[in-house]
Image (tube, rainbow, N blue to C red):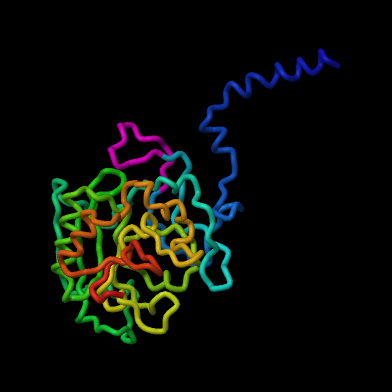
Amino acid sequence: MRRRLITALLALLPLAACTTPEQQRAAQPTTGPGGGATASSASPVPTTTTPVTTPPTTPAPPTTRPFSTPWVVGATPLPLRPDGFGQVLPTPAVLADRALPTRDLLPPPVGDRYAATIDPVPDAVIARSTWTPACPVTRAQLRYLTMSFWGFDGRAHTGEMIVNATAAQGVTRVFGTLFAERFPLEEMRVTAAAELDAAPTGDGNNTGAFVCRKGTKLSSWSAHAYGLALDVNPFCNPYTKGDLVLPELASAYVDRRDRRPGMVLAGDATVRAFAAIGWSWGGDWSSPKDIQHFTATGR
C-alpha cells in the first residue's frame, strides 16, 4: 500500500511542476461581491474599465497600485436591503487600493497638456444622457464639457461632462487645477438613462455632474438635476449615513486616515479649487457625509 501511494504521488509531480501560478489562478472560478459566480445584470451599467489580464511591461507610475484579479465594473448586481439600496458588503481586495485603468472614450489630450471645451449639448450626447423635457432645466441651460484628466494608470485622458451653463467656466478651471496637481480620476463620462433603473452594483467610480434625478431618498430634485453639483471619484469618496455606504462596496474608503490616491481630504487642492468658484463640499456635512459631492447650491 505504501509503495502504491508513493508511486501515485511521483506521477503527479510533473503535472504540478508544469502548472504556472497564472494558470492555477485562471483555473479558479471568478466570484462577485456576494461570493457567487460573477454574472451580468439584466440591465447592466455600461462597462467603464478594461480588465487587466497581464502585468505591465514597464514600471508602474507612482499613482498606480498593482492588482492581480480582473474586475469588470458594473457586472454583478448586489442583493437589496429593505430600503432599496444594495447591501453594504466588504470591499473586494482588488478594489481596496483602487487603481483600475481608464478606457478612452475620447482622444487623449495632445502632448499630455490640459485642454477643455465648452459647447451646447450635441444631439447625440443629449440622446444618451438622462435629460428629458420633464427635467427641471431645459436643454439650452446645459453645456457639454470635455476636459483632460490623469487616470490611475498614470496616463492623460479626455473626459466628458454635462453641467449648468452658469457653472461651465468655473468647472473647467477646477479640473485644470486637478490636472496640474495630477489628481487621479478613474473615469469622466455622461451618465446614461439606463443607469437610473439598473440594479445596484456598488462599484462605480465615475466623476460626473448632471443626472436628472431626485435627491437620495428625497422628493425634491437633486442639485445634480440642475447641473449644479458634481461627484468626484465616488468609490474613493463614499457617501455615508448611518449604516449606509454608497457605493455599497466602498467601505474600505470610509476611514479617511488611510490616505490613498483619488481621495478628497479636508483642505486639499480639490476642496480649495471648488471653494475658489464658490462651491461647497459635502464632506463638511455631519449627516449624511457626502465626501464625493461638490455643489453650487449647498445641497
Residue 276 screen position, x and y as percent:
15, 64
The residue furthest bottom is 134
Residue 120 screen position, x and y as percent:
18, 74
For residue 100, above or below residue 115? above
Drawn side of residue 264 relative to residue 32, left or right: left
Q: Residue at x 39, y 48 (%)?
A: 98
Q: Residue at x 23, y 54 (%)?
A: 268
Magenta span of residues: 51-66
For residue 133, above or below residue 183? below
Residue 9 screen position, x and y as percent:
72, 19
Drawn side of residue 158 relative to residue 32, left or right: left
Q: Residue at x 38, y 65 (%)?
A: 289
Q: Nearer the viewer, residue 57 or 226?
A: 226
Question: Is 216 included in the stretch rendered in magenta?
Answer: no
Which image quadrant for residue 219? bottom left
Which image quadrant for residue 128? bottom left
The residue furthest front is 286
Q: Nearer the viewer, residue 71 or 256?
A: 256
The residue furthest right is 1
Quarter occupied by the C terminus: bottom left
Residue 66 screen position, x and y as percent:
39, 38
